[in-house]
Image: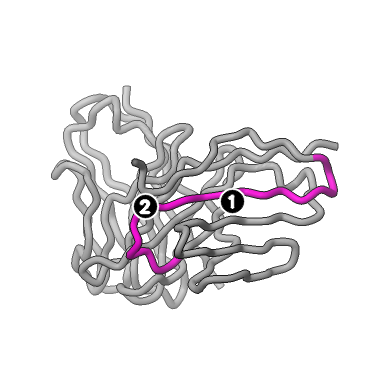
Amino acid sequence: QKEVEQNSGPLSVPEGAIASLNCTYSDRGSQSFFWYRQYSGKSPELIMSIYSNGDKEDGRFTAQLNKASQYVSLLIRDSQPSDSATYLCAVNVLTGGGNKLTFGTGTQLKVEL
Amino acid sequence: DAGVTQSPTHLIKTRGQQVTLRCSPKSGHDTVSWYQQALGQGPQFIFQYYEEEERQRGNFPDRFSGHQFPNYSSELNVNALLLGDSALYLCASSLGGGGGNEQFFGPGTRLTVL
């Protein structure tokens, strides 16, 4: 079982719709969760972080965390063509005081006009 | 506020050679982590430096080594390059060596091994 799993997609949504991206993780010791956006040929850009169960909203983005189900999701409201990118889920586990991020393979999102 | 910077942007090497990549963290950050990203994959953790020491290491061979300087900048060295080392190498900076602190990535160095 992979440590962090994401559906590779592509996930296609029409402009203005809600895009829902999902991620599951295997290590119950995970404490911090992040979503990064990566445009083709560019480096990952941090868009959301979440540390406790529930929802966290930032503009058009909402991150949802359920530690009991080992599940984290990202909702993008009013999707725009500029949201078309690969979205990486990253999970942090504290081991020996370090701060290692484990990434999924990413979900490709396509927002269609 | 200066973000994370990396140099060089692109690099072409041949098998068996050695390479050094450089990273300067975001202003105010003291921790640098290095990742390797192959095409179509998520970044893979190589190691993390804090207080000039390697704090944690991923599943990479000893050919991969690093260093952190007193000004918090860092280098990644790869010896005896293999074709499979071709990838995007990412540096990420954060504040504090522990905790689930947010990591911010630099633009990356694209390494091609021929």
Residue A35 placement (x, y as % from top left): 54, 57
Identified by mark 2, the residue type is Ser
Q: Which mark is residue A73?
A: none
For label 2, the residue is: A26
Q: Is residue B17 above or below residue A28?
A: above
Q: Was residue A63 drawn as part of the magenta stretch in this picture?
A: no
The kind of residue on which mark 1 rests is: Arg
Residue beneath the point at 50% across and 61% down: A34
In this view, B29 is above or below A41: below
In the picture, residue A101 is in which quadrant?
bottom left
Q: Which residue is mark 1?
A: A37
- Residue A99 sits in which quadrant? bottom left
Answer left or right for B25 relative to A41: left
Q: Earlier in the sequence, mark 2 or mark 1?
A: 2
- For this orientation, the residue located farthest to the top is B114
Measuring from the top left, give residue B82's x and y in whole percent.
24, 28
Magenta highlight range: A14-32
| Residue at x 40%, y 68% (from the top left corner) | A31
Is residue A28 found left or right of B62 in the rendered image? Answer: right
Q: Nearer the viewer, mark 2 or mark 1?
A: 2
Packing grade of label 1 (10 A; few <14, some 14-19, many >=20) is many
Quarter holding the C terminus of chain B? Answer: top left
Instruction: Name the chain under label 1.
Output: A
